[in-house]
Image: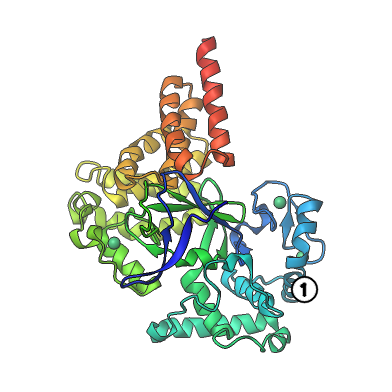
Amino acid sequence: MAQKVERFCSPGKGNGLRAVSSLKAGELLFSTEPFACSVSKRVMKSTCENCLSRKDKLLWCSRCKIAHYCDASCQKQSWPEHKEECQRLKRLHPTIPTDSVRLVAKILSKLVNRSRSPAEKLYSLEELESHLSEMSEEKRSQLEDLGVALRMYLKEEADDLSPLAPGLDPISIIAKVTCNCFSISDGELQEVGVGLYPSVSLLNHACRPNCVMVFEGRILRLRAVQDIRPLEELTISYTDVMMPSQERRKRLQEQYYFLCDCEHCTAADKDSDMLSGPEKDWMSLQHNIPRLEHLQSEQKWEEVLLESQALINSCADTVTDRNVYLVRMLDFALDSCINQAQWDRALEFGIRTLQPYRLYYPDPHPARAVQLMRVGKLQHFLGRLAEARETLRQAYYVMKVTHGDEHALTNELRSKLEEIRMEMDSS
Ligand SMILES: [Zn+2]
Ligand SMILES: [Zn+2]
Ligand SMILES: [Zn+2]
């Protein structure tokens, strides 16, 4: 297949990626394996180390008892890569280091006897930005702490890893990883791991990007979500775009060391919607997000529901559903209802999120596709066939662009629609 994208020097931004020829929304532009990736510690028991599928029943590696696999074939495929990690994990048992420490260790072992990885087709590990010189003291000391954890994990192996190329000492690799790694999510956007995809790190940020990334297992696929002209720069969003401009800019500055001066940031064009309602009323919603995220990660669904519902009620008369912090609360409530099989209630919360999702994701976006699919499935389950068909059709139009026609989730959606069609025909 002819290459559709190329590296170029983007004025004012350094390296970038651009279209070689004109591209259509939904077109697949680039696919790549990671240079290295790690399954998130949080989901290790339910995620295959090799293909990153999530399943209830997996086999475990009998040596480290930490890595899990779908079957013997996934285990066999993964062994050349897992071999070293297996010994490390066994040595440290029962402690499991953080995701980034495990990822950096994998990268370091790949750098010994280094040959260029296909993941570096457009941009190499050496070229990745580390932003070391721009880092605050605090950030630097966090890196040093990671370095200590890494040495403890590698033990005597650390000495064998010393003959690395200049600029690739462990601390600068840790810095490169923190600025460049992507979190890998499954089709339904649940985070399953972290990975380094050097070529894709060429993409610069935009608050209204013309491309999105979707993963299939460990493979990253980049697709256009707008029609793109020849030589136009390709962009993705480094942060969630459903965030007021000031918050977006703060995150970009802190994590990626640049001030976004795009038209959406300078005009703050959606802030009046995103922050609608009296501040005193939505402040407590904003403040409680980290706590609710924590409860959610611990799967304390009853508490998540009680608290999000109370916060939603607290501003029922003054804050509209467009307010982004209220949307977050509705999402917490939706998630906890689904996990407690409270379908009717889940649907009520889900429906309320659809309009703000449409407003804040004006182009096809995976988050919108998945949200529509969740709501459509609830409608289907509750026997509201016509509504389900409508919602799932909308999901399908978005998903064809963001995930592509062949993605497992798009296939699932197609069969769901077919199922509904048959149910409607027979009733
Ligand atoms: Zn597998
Ligand atoms: Zn193992
Ligand atoms: Zn911006």
Image x and y of residue 334, in percent? 43, 41
Q: Position of residue 214 (x, y in %)?
A: 51, 51
> Position of 113 compared to 259: left or right?
right
Q: Which residue is mark 1?
A: 87
* 113 horizontally vs 312: left or right: right
* Callout 1: CB less than 8 Å from ligand 2: no
312, 21: nearer the viewer: 21
Residue found 25% across the figure and 51% down from its top: 274
Count numbered badges in the picture.
1
Res 103 quadrant in image? bottom right
> Considering depth in this image, is 147 or 408 the residue closer to the camera?
408
Rendered residue at 54%/46% (across/down)? 187
**Residue 156, percent from left and from top:** 73, 87
Q: Secondary structure at mark 1?
A: helix
Tell me, what colour scheme is on the image?
A: rainbow
The picture places residue 378, in percent across and down from the top left corner, at: 47, 31
Q: Residue at x 37, y 52 (%)?
A: 210
For mark 1, does the 10 Å Cα neighbourhood hold few (<14), some (14 to 19), or many (20 or more) residues?
Answer: some
Query: Is residue 298 visible in the rendered structure shown here?
Result: no
**Residue 130 visible at all:** yes
Q: Amino acid at mark 1?
A: Gln
In the image, is 361 to the left or to the right of 399?
A: left
Location of residue 152 (image quadrant)? bottom right
